[in-house]
Image (cartoon, rainbow, N blue to C red):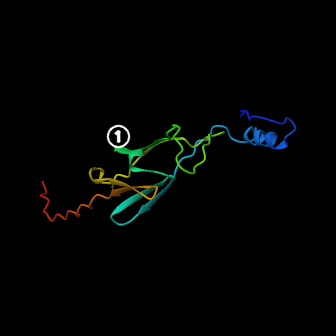
């Protein structure tokens, strides 16, 4: 992809270097990156930590689908509006912008021991925390009975 630069002097190597930098064939064009995910387990729960820079609560949706799986969606759209410049600020425009939109969706199959009715989630410091409490273990039933012999 070529990004035109206004050139006042055709022999200016900086303009060429600038364009060549953004038109590198070796650079990936459309890469998708998934946020980093950690899963911790304690005696009472699993905790998922999903990290994405700039993550806010309003970008996230967490739900259990019809199959009983956990679905995590993160969608961030950047505003592309020109804001008036007040005071001592510099007006600029992007020559290349690749991180203006983020869309992530992942479905996780939950272990049988997760209490799906009490899952909770929160966003803190750019990390989505999903608490997956474990079901309380059922006490082992002990039976003492006599079997009749026929």
Of residues 119 and 2, the one nearer the viewer is 2
Give the residue drawn at x 62%, y 40%: 94
Nearest the eye: 18 or 40:
18
Could you say which is closer to the camera, residue 141 or residue 96? 96
Q: Residue furthest front?
A: 87
In the rendered view of the protein, which quadrant contains the N terminus?
top right
Q: Quick check: 23 left or right of 107? A: right
Q: Residues within 10 Å of mark 1 (few under 14, many from 20)?
A: few
Residue 146 drawn at (x, y percent): 13, 62
At a point 46% along the width and 51% down the height, the residue shown is 55
Would you say residue 141 is visible in this rendering? yes
- Place residue 138 in its image quadrant: bottom left
Placement of 16 over or under 55, stated as above or below: above
Residue 44 horizontal side relative to residue 145, left or right: right
Residue 89 at what x, y percent from top left? 58, 49
Tell whether 20 sits left or right of 59.
right
Q: Is residue 60 visible?
A: no
> Mark 1 highlights which residue?
65
Secondary structure of the residue carrying numbered label 1: loop
């Amino acid at each position: 992809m070529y990004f035109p630069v206004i050139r006042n002097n055709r022999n200016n190597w900086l303009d060429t270097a600038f364009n060549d930098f953004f038109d590198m064939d070796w650079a990936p064009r459309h890469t998708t990156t998934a946020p980093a995910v950690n899963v911790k387990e304690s005696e009472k729960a699993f905790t998922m930590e999903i990290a994405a820079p700039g993550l806010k609560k309003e970008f996230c949706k967490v739900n259990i689908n019809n199959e009983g799986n956990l679905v995590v969606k993160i969608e961030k759209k950047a505003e592309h509006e020109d804001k008036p410049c007040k005071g001592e600020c510099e007006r600029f425009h992007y020559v290349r912008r690749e991180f203006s939109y983020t869309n992530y969706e992942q479905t996780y199959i939950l272990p049988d021991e997760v209490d799906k009715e009490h899952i909770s989630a929160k966003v803190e410091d750019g990390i989505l925390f999903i608490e997956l409490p474990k079901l309380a273990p059922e006490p082992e039933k002990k039976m003492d009975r006599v079997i009749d012999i026929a």
